[in-house]
Structure formats: structure tokens, C-alpha cells
Image (cartoon, rainbow, N blue to C red):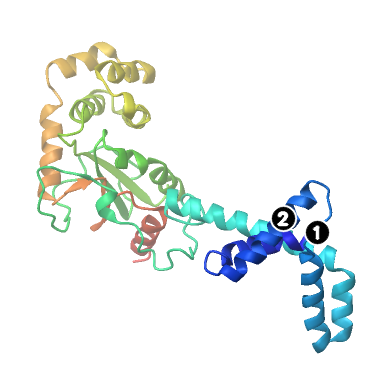
């Protein structure tokens, strides 16, 4: 199996060196013959065995002889280790591309690809607000106590989100938010403030519908809230009504609220609060008064939340 290792190693080195390409070609021929149950005719396996054992014998004859005698077994061990290493390296690359962390979703362990945690470009992780072309540092303003929340009013840490129901990045962060809420369920209060972006279809209508639920049957608000994100790709008037039926709302009350624009003032006030807070895209979070912009990671939430808890 030394030929398989040689094929992988010299195949990579052959990209940069013509000499190594010749060895890689020999290794490929040897591996192909072994797979088809034929002997390796290039002699590469024996040549590598002799070269490696010979060099070791010069330093330690006893070790060199032992290596020569068990060379096939040792080759298998190194092949297995190499394949396992390639698998985990490839998995780390995939995780980093998808989750921004080479250890998997919502993982705050060290990542060799991003040791300083500076890889994510926040400009690409937000849905931009057309009314805020000039980006300023977000500063939370207004009363957050009048909005829907999860947790205790007496929590020392309040996490506020300005979100748009039709923004893909706002949806992306939902599972991370759920992880944060589960991890710190006894320590934080989570507040949601509508910031519907005008260029997202049904963003405003979804905010109106959710606000109607909060105004009339607040006990159903969060079920309705999360299900809007579950159905983000198919948002429509019918979808918003179907979700209302699914969570068990009083449909007559719900329809009456929408038909009479009873939630319009609340949604418009929410949006203005976002503008006053320099919100230039969704999602934007505040951990107490510390802003986090974009599809932030669990690691970023954890760092700020624990910093505030330890004050």
C-alpha cells in the first residue's frame, strides 16, 4: 500500500515538479495493477521499501530491519492515517465554507482557518436597508420594553434584534439564536423589533401580520414568528393566513386587525426606531448596548453575552 501513499503525496508534488510527476505516474500504474489483482511491474513499491529501510539502517540497523520486515503492515497504518486526515481536513474546509467555522455549526472552538475570527465580511451577511445608504455605527435608541420578548424582564442582559421576516440573512441566524436562547435561557431577555425592508416582497405584510398577533393574542406570537421564517420562501397573504390557522389564532380577530390596518402604526414606529438607531441592514443585534451586525456566529454572541453577564 506504499504505492497509494506515494500516489497521493507525489501526485500533489507533481503539480509543481516534473520529477515528482514521473514518480506519481509510476505510483498510479502500481495502484491500478494492485486494484485489478495484478503485480506491480514498475518496482516502485520495492524501490521505496529499500530506500526507506536503507536510510534507517544507516542510523539504526535494528530499526531498519524491523521496518523492512513489517513494511507492508506499516504502509497500511500510514495509509489509513492519511485517508482519515484527508477526510477530516475536507470536512473542516466544508464546515468553514458553510458555517464560518471549521468545527461545525454553532461551534466556538479554535479554527485553524480563521485563528483571529476575522474571516466573515459583514457586508455580505446583511440585507441592506435602502433608507440607510450612509453606514453609521448602530446605537440603540427608544424603548425596547414595548416589543415582544422571551425571558425575564429582570434579566441583566437584553438581546435586541432588528429583523426583517423576508431577509434571508435574518432567517439564517434563527438556529443560532435558538442555541443562544437555550444556552442562556435563565440569563437573558430576547426582544424582536420589526425592520421590514421595502425591497423584500411581503416583508411589510409579514410584519403587519405578526404585530396583529402580538396586539391581540400575544401568547401565540412566538409560534407565529418562527413559522414565518419557516415559510420565508413562500410568503404570501395565503401563507400568512395559513400560519395563523396552524397556530390556532382567532381568525376573525386576525383578519379584522389586518383589514383595518390596526398594526400599521406599530410596525411603522418599529421601523423608525431602527432608522433612529442607525440600522443599515438586517439582522442587527444589540447585546445590551453593544451592536452585532449581520449573520453573527454563536461564538460572537457568547463572547458579548458572557462579557455582559460578568460585569
Above-or-below relation of 125 to 108: above
Image-quadrant location for residue 85: bottom right
Q: Earlier in the sequence, mark 1 or mark 2?
A: 2
Q: Quadrant of the N terminus?
A: bottom right
- For the residues marked 1 and 2, what is the alpha-carbon distance in whole angstroms? 8 Å
Q: Quadrant of the C terminus?
A: bottom left
Q: Nearer the viewer, residue 157 or 207?
A: 207
Which residue does the image show at 37% across and 58% down from the upper left?
300
Which residue does the image show at 33% across and 62% down from the upper left?
308
* Residue 197: image location, x then y, percent: 17, 37
Element on which disc 1 rests: loop
Question: How many numbered badges does the structure rendering display?
Answer: 2
For the residue carrying disc 1, how many other residues have a C-alpha within 10 Å: few (<14), some (14-19), or many (20+)? few
Question: Marks 2 and 1: in contact by CB < 8 Å?
Answer: yes
Which residue does the image show at 29% across and 49% down from the upper left?
125
* Residue 96: image location, x then y, percent: 46, 54
Q: Is residue 110 left or right of residue 146?
A: right
Q: Can the viewer see residue 28 in this picture? A: yes
Mark 1 sits on what residue? 41
Q: Which mark is residue 29?
A: 2
Q: Is residue 153 left or right of residue 93?
A: left
Amino acid at each position: 500500500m506504499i504505492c497509494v501513499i506515494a500516489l497521493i503525496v507525489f501526485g500533489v508534488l507533481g503539480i509543481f515538479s516534473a520529477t515528482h510527476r514521473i514518480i506519481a505516474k509510476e505510483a498510479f500504474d502500481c495502484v491500478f495493477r494492485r486494484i485489478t489483482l495484478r503485480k506491480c511491474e514498475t518496482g516502485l513499491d520495492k524501490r521505496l521499501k529499500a530506500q526507506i529501510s536503507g536510510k534507517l539502517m544507516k542510523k539504526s540497523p535494528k530499526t531498519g530491519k524491523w521496518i523492512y520486515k513489517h513494511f507492508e503492515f506499516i504502509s497500511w497504518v500510514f495509509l489509513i492515517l492519511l485517508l482519515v486526515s484527508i477526510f477530516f481536513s475536507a470536512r473542516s474546509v466544508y464546515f468553514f465554507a458553510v458555517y464560518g467555522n471549521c468545527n461545525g455549526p454553532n461551534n466556538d472552538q479554535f479554527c485553524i482557518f480563521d485563528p483571529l475570527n476575522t474571516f466573515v465580511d459583514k457586508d455580505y451577511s446583511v440585507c441592506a436597508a435602502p433608507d440607510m445608504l450612509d453606514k453609521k455605527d448602530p446605537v440603540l435608541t427608544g424603548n425596547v420594553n414595548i416589543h415582544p420578548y422571551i425571558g425575564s424582564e429582570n434579566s441583566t442582559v437584553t438581546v435586541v434584534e432588528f429583523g426583517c421576516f423576508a431577509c434571508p440573512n435574518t432567517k439564517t441566524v434563527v438556529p443560532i439564536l435558538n442555541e443562544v436562547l437555550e444556552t442562556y435561557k435563565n440569563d437573558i431577555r430576547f426582544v424582536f423589533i420589526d425592520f421590514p425592508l421595502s425591497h423584500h416582497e411581503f416583508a411589510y405584510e409579514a410584519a403587519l401580520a405578526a404585530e396583529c398577533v402580538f396586539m391581540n393574542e400575544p401568547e401565540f406570537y412566538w409560534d407565529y414568528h418562527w413559522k414565518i421564517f419557516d415559510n420565508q420562501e413562500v410568503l404570501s397573504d395565503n401563507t400568512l393566513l395559513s400560519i395563523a390557522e396552524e397556530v390556532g389564532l382567532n381568525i376573525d380577530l386576525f383578519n379584522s386587525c389586518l383589514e383595518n390596518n390596526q398594526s400599521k402604526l406599530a410596525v411603522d414606529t418599529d421601523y423608525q426606531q431602527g432608522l433612529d438607531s442607525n440600522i443599515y441592514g438586517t439582522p442587527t443585534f444589540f447585546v445590551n448596548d453593544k451592536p452585532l451586525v449581520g449573520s453573527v456566529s454563536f461564538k460572537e454572541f457568547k463572547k458579548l453575552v458572557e462579557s455582559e453577564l460578568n460585569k
